[in-house]
Amino acid sequence: MIQKENSFGTFDQEINTFFKDAHHFASLINTCLYQGQEIVKPQDLMLVDPKIQAYTRDVLMLWNGRYGSYYLGIENQLIENYPMPYRILQYDCLVYKDQMDALEKEHRKKKDLRSSEEFLSGIKASDRLIPCITIVIYYGTRPWQTNFSMKDMFDVKDMSSLIDFKMNLIEVHSDTHQYKDKELDLVFSMTRDILNANFNTIKNKYKQGIPKQVALVIASMAKDEELYQQIKEEEKEVIVMCESLDRMREEARAEGMILGRRDGLIQGEEKAELRILTNLLKKGISDSYILEITGVSSELLMKAKQSIH
């Protein structure tokens, strides 16, 4: 079993590795930014160091393509982060600052600044920056509820004069895009079904085997430690996800999880229900699966999660 304090880090690594593949990355960008047109070609993408100063992004690519050069970034969010618009703005600005520093350093080295305007600016009027576009991918079971732009973080009556910064957000639980990259489309569609506890759909729809590494990405996006560990321990390299989910359900029943839920209902005590939910959460069972096998309300589940912390 993966230790809980390390699980999100492990999940991040799996997801980041998946999107470092140029085909997956290009398909995501084309679908989300260019309505499915094949504008970004995998061969025009170059993985670059995501660390800028003290900050490390999840995935950062340099795209040299049809429209010029762009930095394209992905930030994965397993849970909602309230200041996310600010974080993305900060990340993007650091990309620009890094370029500005490089330009100023180059001009100091060449000593080619001539006019007072150039000396004041530290660059020439003809210098240009590479723009940066970031997509936030959110894997929560509930809709993103708080801040979608910088304006959402302010509390003033007149925002007409403010320059807004709105983040590009994909919510996997409700994402209906069809991706031309088959692995990306499979990962998002199956993750969506797990997040929404559509286990019958998974059982009927996904009977084909998929690569083990892809299955691990799906379990990571669903934040499901039990499923992740079960797949990790498989010796074969092709996984049938509906079988893995069935085995996980049988193991849960064998441990008396559902029986314990029924006992709690018979006692009619919220305390008993909270104890059962806490045990499930500590085992790393995903929110969607807990809701499916217990039938409790999302409010009670949230209360159990708060009691752990």
Image (cartoon, rainbow, N blue to C red):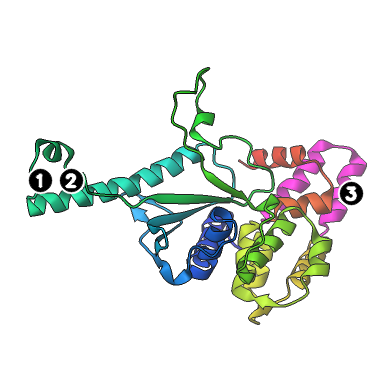
Whether residue 21 is visible here, answered yes or no, is no
Query: Which residue lies most toward the top here?
Result: 157
Residue at label 3?
262
Which label number is shown at residue 124? 2
Give yes or no for contact between labels 2 and 1 (Cβ–Cβ under 8 Å).
yes
Neighbour tally class for label 2: few under 14, some 14-19, many 20 plus, Cα within 10 Å: some
Q: Nearer the viewer, residue 129 or 204?
A: 129
Circle 2: element type: loop
Give yes or no for contact between labels 3 and 1 (Cβ–Cβ under 8 Å).
no
Q: Which of labels 2 and 3 is toward the front? A: 2
Q: Amino acid at mark 3?
A: Arg
Spatial separation of the CA atoms under disc 2 and disc 3? 72 Å
The magenta segment is 255-284
Residue at label 1?
113
Instruction: Decide which of tag 2 and tag 1 comes sooner along the chain.
Output: 1
Q: Position of residue 269 (x, y in %)?
A: 85, 37
Q: Main secondary structure of the magenta part?
A: helix
- Determine whether, in the image, residue 157 is placed left or right of residue 207: left
Q: Position of residue 99 (x, y in %)?
A: 27, 50
Q: Amino acid at mark 1?
A: Leu
The residue sitting at 80% across, 41% down in the picture is 297
Spatial separation of the CA atoms under disc 3 and disc 1? 77 Å
Q: Answer above or below: position of 291 versus 209.
A: above
Q: Amino acid at mark 2?
A: Lys
Which quarter of the figure is the N terminus placed in? bottom right
